[in-house]
Image (tube, rainbow, N blue to C red):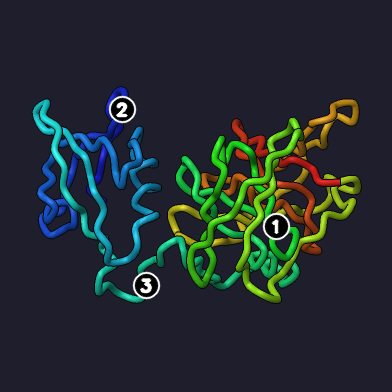
């Protein structure tokens, strides 16, 4: 991806371009303003990288850009074609890389799947043979959701309910047989500031499901609030919304929700 700077409003302006890079081969030039990639609106450099993360290795994607006030269209070829084995894989085949944490924690990656979202990738946790849970804001008003598994893409049905919180269920046929299914125990009720907690979710940049740096519980939900949240210092970043917040034993504590000001949040499951 050419180096880009945020442009006020919609789009990013290219400020640097490798002579032999994919951008130059696509006809892009310094000062061009990228408006969309693969039909996804580009608002800042992060959204451009996120859109490119969905492109299969060696595939091409439509890029809409503006040059001197005129809108143009080109095709950008993914750098993955014929590349080295160190390059990241596409998101429809999540990578299960080495994990430096306890096995009870690392194995939870089997139960978390990337989900297509507006961001453009988020996460979902398997809680049944054909059932996933994620955040409502991940799927929005969609009736169906695209799930990325190690064997390919699946389409799931979003199950409508009257639940007022930021959780929704997705029914999916074809999830890996014999895969890990998380149980919704009462672990959240026993959450403690002395324990370590981990977030397992999709990493947009690295195109894999991974365990992020652990942290502690800052404070739990207000017991008088029906929709209270857990506040943790465990690392969260784009892509983990809908992922699993677990303890060191691999027990599901809650569903991750991106936070701010260092106060990452999760919806407790009890």
Q: Please tell me which residue lies in front, 63 or 195.
A: 63
Q: Residue at x 33, y 36 (%)?
A: 42
Q: Which quadrant of the view contains residue 64?
A: top left
Q: In front here: 182 or 262? A: 182
Question: Where does the image place residue 98, in percent across and percent down from the top left?
Answer: 57, 73
Tell me if 191 is positioned left or right of 235 in this view: right
| CA gap, disc 3 and disc 2 | 33 Å
Q: Is residue 265 left or right of residue 140?
A: right
Residue matched to label 1: 131
Structural crowding at the residue carrying mark 2, measured as other residues with C-alpha within 10 Å and reported as few (<14), some (14–19) or many (≥20) = some
Badge 3 density bin: few <14, some 14–19, many ≥20, Cα 10 Å: few
Marks 1 and 3, Cα distance to the nearest angstrom?
33 Å
* Number of the label disc, if any, that sits on residue 86: 3
Secondary structure of residue under mark 2: loop
Tell me the number on the disc at residue 10: 2
Q: Nearer the viewer, mark 3 or mark 2?
A: 2
Q: Are marks 3 and 2 in contact (CB under 8 Å)?
A: no
Task: Work out how far the residue at label 2 is from the one at label 1, CA to CA, in angstroms.
Answer: 37 Å
Q: Residue at x 86, y 46 (%)?
A: 270
**Apparent side of residue 157 relative to residue 95 in the rendered image (left or right):** right
Q: Quick check: can you spot residue 214?
A: no
- Which of marks 3 and 1 precedes in the sequence? 3
| Whole-percent x, y for residue 202 in the image | 54, 55
Q: Mark 1 packing: few (<14 Cα in 10 Å), some, or many (20+)? A: some
Q: Is residue 213 above or below residue 107?
A: above
Provide the secondary structure element on which disc 1 rests: strand
Is 93 placed left or right of 198 in the picture? Answer: left
């Amino acid at each position: 991806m050419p180096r880009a700077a945020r442009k006020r409003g919609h789009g990013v302006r290219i400020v640097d371009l490798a002579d032999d890079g994919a951008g130059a081969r696509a006809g892009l030039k310094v000062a061009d303003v990228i408006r969309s990639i693969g039909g996804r609106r580009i608002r800042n450099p992060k959204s451009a990288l996120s859109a490119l993360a969905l492109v299969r290795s060696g595939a091409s994607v439509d890029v809409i850009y503006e040059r001197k006030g005129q809108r143009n269209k080109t095709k950008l070829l993914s750098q993955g074609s014929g590349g080295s084995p160190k390059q990241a894989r596409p998101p429809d085949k999540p990578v299960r890389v080495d994990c430096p944490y306890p096995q009870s924690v690392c194995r939870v990656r089997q139960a978390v799947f990337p989900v297509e979202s507006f961001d453009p990738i988020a996460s979902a946790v398997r809680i049944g043979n054909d059932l996933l849970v994620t955040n409502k804001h991940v799927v929005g008003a969609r009736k169906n959701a695209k799930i990325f598994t190690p064997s390919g893409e699946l389409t799931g049905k979003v199950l409508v309910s009257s639940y007022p919180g930021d959780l929704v269920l997705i029914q999916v046929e074809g999830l890996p047989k014999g895969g890990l299914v998380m149980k919704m125990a009462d672990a959240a009720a026993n959450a403690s500031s002395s324990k370590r907690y981990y977030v397992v979710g999709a990493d947009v940049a690295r195109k894999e499901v991974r365990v992020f740096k652990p942290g502690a519980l800052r404070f739990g939900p207000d017991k008088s609030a029906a929709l209270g949240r857990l506040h943790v210092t465990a690392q969260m970043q784009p892509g983990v919304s809908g992922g699993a917040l677990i303890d060191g034993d691999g027990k599901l504590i809650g569903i991750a929700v991106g936070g701010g000001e260092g106060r990452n949040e999760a919806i407790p499951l009890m």
